Amino acid sequence: MAERIGVYVCKCGPNIGDKVDVDAIVDDVKGIEGVATAKSHNLLCSADGLEFLKSEIEGEKLTRVVVAACTPKMYEQKLMRACEEAGLNPFLMQMTNIREQCAWVTPDKALATRKARSLVMAAINRAPLLEPIERKEIEVQADVLVVGGGVAGLEACLSLAQKGRKVYLVEKSPCIGGLAARFEEVYPTMECAPCMIAPELQEVLQKENIEVFTHSEVEETLGSFGNFSVKIRRKARYVSEEACIGCGACFEPCPVEVSNEYDEGLSKRKAIYVPFAGALPNVPVIDKDNCKRFKGEECRACEQACPFGAISFDDKDEVIERKVGAIILATGATLLDPKALPQYGYGKLDNVVTALQLERLNASNGPTGGKVLLKNGKEPKSIAFVFCVGRKEKEYCSGICCMYSIKLAHIMREKLPDAKLYCFYSDICVPKKEHQQWYDRVVDQGVEFIRSNGTVAVTADKGKLAVKHGTDSSGKTVSVDMVVLAPAVEPSSDIEKLAGILDTSRDDHGFFCEEHALMKPFATALEGVFAVGSCQGPKDIGDAVAQAGAAAGRVLSRLVPGEKLALEPMVAVVDEDLCSGCKTCILLCPYSAITRDKEKGTSVVDEALCRGCGTCVAACPSGAITAKQFTREQILAEIKGVAK
C-alpha cells in the first residue's frame, strides 16, 4: 500500500514566516509522489496547532507525517504525542528544522527558502523508510544502594528513606560519619562537627527502612537502572552488634597496640577497638591482621573480659545480595601522602604534620584531648601553614585546601593567642560569598600570608624547622616549631576497584567521571549510578550534601514504587548474521550496554542500558549494528532528498 504523507510547514509566527516563503514550499511539495497533503500553519506547537495536526492525521488517513518547524529539541515530543493521540505511531513523524538552520541564519529570503525546501524534501524522502517503534517499559525496584557513610551518604540515605522504599548503606569502615566525624569544628559556621552530624547518624542507624552495613564492601553489581543485583561482603566483625552494649571492657585487657589510623598515626589503639570516642555504631571490631589469636596464639583476653558474651572468634564473612533500582556512590576522597614530596620533610622531620593530623590534635576526642602539642609535649610558639602541597603534581586545584588551612589558622590563633602564625601560599582560593570574610578575619588576627610561588622547602634548624620559599637568594626563610601541610585531595584508594565493579568511568585525575560537567554533574555515564561528594571531585561539606540531595531527588522522581520505567526507544540493534564477534562495540560503548553472547559469539545490546548514542554503529567494522530510526538507508535517502 502506498504511503500517505502529510507535510506541515510551521510559520512560527514571524520567526519563520517573515524569513522563508512558506507558501511556496507548500506548493512545491504538493505534487510529490506519496504526499497526500501539504499545508502551512502559523504555530503548530500551540493548542490550536496540535488539534489541527490531529484532525489532519485522522481526516487524511495519513501513514507518515513531516513537520518543518523549529528545532526538534523544543517541541518534537509534544508533536509526537499529538500523532499518537491521533492513532499514528509517533515514530512515523519526521521533523526538520527550518528555523535555526534556515530562517535565523540566512538573511536572504530567497536563499533561506531554497535551503528550507531542501530540508523539507530530505524529510519527505526519508519518511517512507521510518519504522514504527513500540515504547517499552520495565518493572523496577524502588530501593536504593548508597555506598559510603560520610556526610554525602548520610544525606542521600535520609532523603531517600521515604515510605515504601528501602535504602541500603554500605560503609567499608567499622563506623559511619566519614571524615567529618574526625573534625572538631567546620567552616564557615565553626560548629562542632560531631555534634552537627550526630542526629543524622542516630537517625540513619535507627530508621526502620535504612539497613546499614558497616565494615562491608560492594563485591559485585549486575543489571541496569531499575533492576540492579548487588552483592555486599560484610566482613566478620568478631563482635556481635546485637549483644554488645559498647561498655569498652574488652579494650584494656588486649595486649596488642598498633598505630591508630583514625588519629592519623598520632596515637595507639588495641587490636579490638572502636575507631574513635563517639564512633557509631558503638560496637568494637577485631583487627584480624594484628590480633594474636588470629596469628596462632592462644590469647582470649578480650573474650574473657566481655561480660555479655559478645565476642566470637568463629565469625565468618557474609555475602549478602540485595535488589535495588539505583546506586549512589558517596565514597569520599583522601589526602595526598606528603611523603611522596620529600622537600617538605614529612615523615622524616618531627613536628611536620598534615592538616588532618592537626585536626585530630585539636579534637576533644583526639590523641591529646584537644591540646595542640609538639612531639616533646610542649605547645608550639610558631606554626607555618603550607598551602597547595601536591597541587603541581596533581595538576588541579583541590579548591578546599585554602579554606581548611585558613580555618585551622583561625583556631590556632584562638587556642594559641601568642603564637606566630605564617601561611605560605601560591594562590588563594576563596570562591564562596563567606570565604573572603574568613580570609580577611585571619589577616586581621595577625596571621602573616607569604606568597611562595609554589616552591617551599622544610629543613631541620637547631631543634626547630626552617621553612624557605623561593628559588633564589631572595627567598624568605622562617623558623618555626611546627609545619602544617595542606595536601591536595585525591581519590580514595579503593575507587579503582569500585569503578571496575560498576564498570563506570573515571576522569583523568582518578575521580568518578560525571556524565556532563554542567547539566548532569552528579550522574555517571551508567544510567542509575550517581557519584556525589568528593568521590566525584574535591568538595566541602555543603557542596557534598547539596549534591547528595540532588541525586536523591533525581532517584525519587524516576523510581516510583509501583510505577514502570520507560526505556529509550531508539536503541542500537545487532544483526547476528553479520556480527563477527570482534568485540569492538563492547570496548567502545560508553554506557556498558553491550555484552557478548558466549554461545553465539555475537554482541548483544541491553535495551535497558543503551542510550542510542550510535558509537557502536559508527565503529562496527562489519556493519552489523544499526540504530533505530538512523539506518543507513534512512540517512542515505535524506541525503538524496537534499539534492532534489
Image: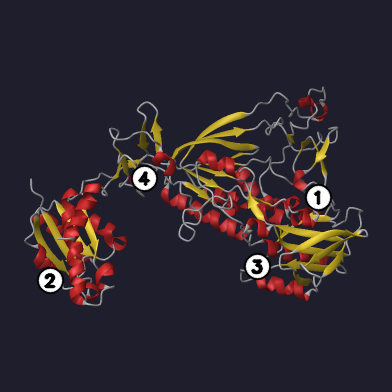
**Secondary structure type for disc 3:** loop
Which label was assigned to residue 23? Answer: 2
**Amino acid of disc 1:** Gly
In percent of width and height, residue 280 lies at 69, 44
| Residue 304 found in image quarter | top right
Which residue does the numbered mark 3 point to in the structure image?
A: 429
Secondary element under disc 2, as helix, strand or loop, is: helix
| Other-residue count near label 3 (Cα within 10 Å), few / some / many at <14 / 14–19 / ≥20 | some
Q: Nearer the viewer, residue 476 or 222?
A: 476
Image location (x, y in percent) of residue 178 = 66, 49
Please tell me which of labels 2 and 3 falls first in the chain.
2
Q: Amino acid at mark 2?
A: Asp
Q: Are marks 2 and 1 in contact (CB under 8 Å)?
A: no
* Residue 347 sits above or below residue 186 on the image: above
Q: Residue at x 61, y 58 (%)?
A: 539
Name the residue that disc number 4 marks: 619
Q: How many marks?
A: 4
* On-image quarter of the C terminus: bottom left
Q: For the residues labelled 2 and 3, say whether their Cβ atoms are less than 8 Å apart.
A: no
Of marks 4 and 3, the one in the foreground: 4
Which badge, 2 or 4, is on the more N-terminal residue? 2
Q: Secondary structure at mark 4?
A: helix
Residue 208 seen in this snapshot:
no
Identify which residue is drawn at 10% across, 66% down.
28
Q: Earlier in the sequence, mark 1 or mark 3?
A: 1
